[in-house]
Image: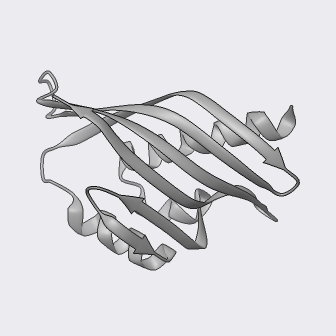
């Protein structure tokens, strides 16, 4: 049960990292050799490349709120195959969202000396409005 709680916490920390744009804290969520695959970003490999991309992809005045649900984790020792749904709201301060997207995230997470970290992720855009 402890591993499941820690993996759920990892996904919550990922959402907060993205929403708060705390790129300097990326190592608390991702492994150094992380690989991310998504329709928006293509393929990114390595923590430094991921952080650099996130910094340059920021849209001035635009914020996000990620809500992650339906987390499934198939834990096998120090690795877990996970999947989750995410709804992302894009908004400007004080305004209703101007775009909303539904995502599916299929990930591999690994146990490190510092806790569970995201090693690889495939994001699928399910819908957008």
User: Residue 3: percent from the left, percent from the top?
Assistant: 82, 41
- Quarter of the rendering containing residue 32: bottom right
Give the residue at the far top of this rendering.
Answer: 96
Looking at the picture, tell me which residue is in the foreground, 110 or 90: 110
Quarter that holds the C terminus: top left
Q: Give percent across and percent down for residue 97.
A: 16, 26
Q: Is residue 38 above or below residue 91?
A: below
Residue 2 versus residue 43 in the image, above or below: above
| Residue at horizontal 37 percent and vertical 46 percent from the top | 124
* Residue 74 percent coordinates (x, y): 75, 41
In which quadrant will I find the N terminus?
top right
Residue 49, above or below 66: below
31 horizontally vs 1: left or right: left
* Depth check, front residue: 66 or 38: 38
Give residue 78's quadrant in the image: bottom right
Image check: 113 left or right of 45?
right
Horizontal relation, residue 50 to residue 119: left or right: left
- The residue drawn where x is 41% and y is 49% is 123
Say which residue appears at 44% left-offset and 38% top-offset: 104
- In the rendered image, which quarter is residue 87 located in? top left
50 vs 21: above or below: below
């Amino acid at each position: 049960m402890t591993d499941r709680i820690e993996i759920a916490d990892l996904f919550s920390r990922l959402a907060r990292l993205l929403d708060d744009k705390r790129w300097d804290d990326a190592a608390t969520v991702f492994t150094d050799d992380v690989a991310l695959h998504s329709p928006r970003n293509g393929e990114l490999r390595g923590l430094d490349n991921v952080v650099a991309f996130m910094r340059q992809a920021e849209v001035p005045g635009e914020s996000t709120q990620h809500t992650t649900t339906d987390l499934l984790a198939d834990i096998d020792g120090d690795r877990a195959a996970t999947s989750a749904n995410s709804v992302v709201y894009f908004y400007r301060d004080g305004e209703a969202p101007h775009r909303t997207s539904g995502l599916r995230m299929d990930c591999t997470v690994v146990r490190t000396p510092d806790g569970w970290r995201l090693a690889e992720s495939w994001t699928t855009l399910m819908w957008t409005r």
